[in-house]
Image (cartoon, rainbow, N blue to C red):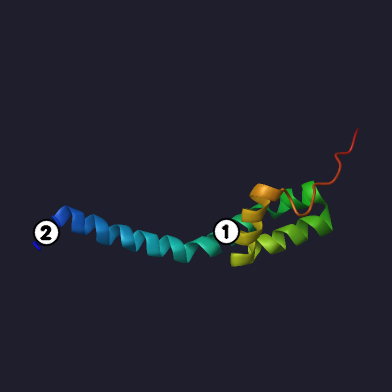
Amino acid sequence: MAMEKKSLKRKVLHAGGWQVAKRAAKMLPFGGTAVVLFLVGSDIKNKGIVGGLANSGMDAIPFVGLAKNAIELFRGDFIADKEPTKR
């Protein structure tokens, strides 16, 4: 059983890729929270004050927001948008 030796380039890519993956996994939940804080105004505008704050609040909680958004991909919004007003 001869072991296949990895080239230096492959070793560097493997180690570097693992470091990037670990950093991305650590940042993802809180990076999502920053996006939610940036978009809270549009949620309030589309869903109303109570609905927008509830939707943004659920999205801001790291793993709850991830699960909620994964379900909403298939089911649709939990909190529906308000009816558009006619001028």
Q: How many marks?
A: 2
Q: Secondary structure at mark 2?
A: loop
**Which disc number belongs to residue 32?**
1
- Image coordinates for residue 81, horizontal then vertical, percent: 80, 47
What is the number of the mark on residue 11?
none
Left or right, 6 with reference to 43:
left
Viewer-nearest residue: 30 or 7: 7
Residue 34, quarter of picture = bottom right
- The crowding category of the residue bearing disc 2, from other C-alpha atoms within 10 Å (few below 14, some 14 to 19, many at least 20), is few
Give amino acid for label 2: Lys
Q: Residues within 10 Å of mark 1 (few under 14, many from 20)?
A: some
Spot occupied by residue 71 in the image (x, y as percentages of width and height): 65, 55
Identify the residue under disc 2: 5
Which residue is found at the position 89% from the left and 38% from the top? 85
For badge 1, the amino acid type reads Gly
Image position of 72 (left or right of 32): right
Quadrant of the rendered image containing residue 63? bottom right
Q: Horizontally, is 80 left or right of 67 in the view?
A: right
Asked where in the image residue 33 lies, by quadrant, the reply is bottom right
Q: State the separation of the CA atoms marked 1 and 2.
A: 40 Å
Judge depth for marks 1 and 2 and give the one in front. 2
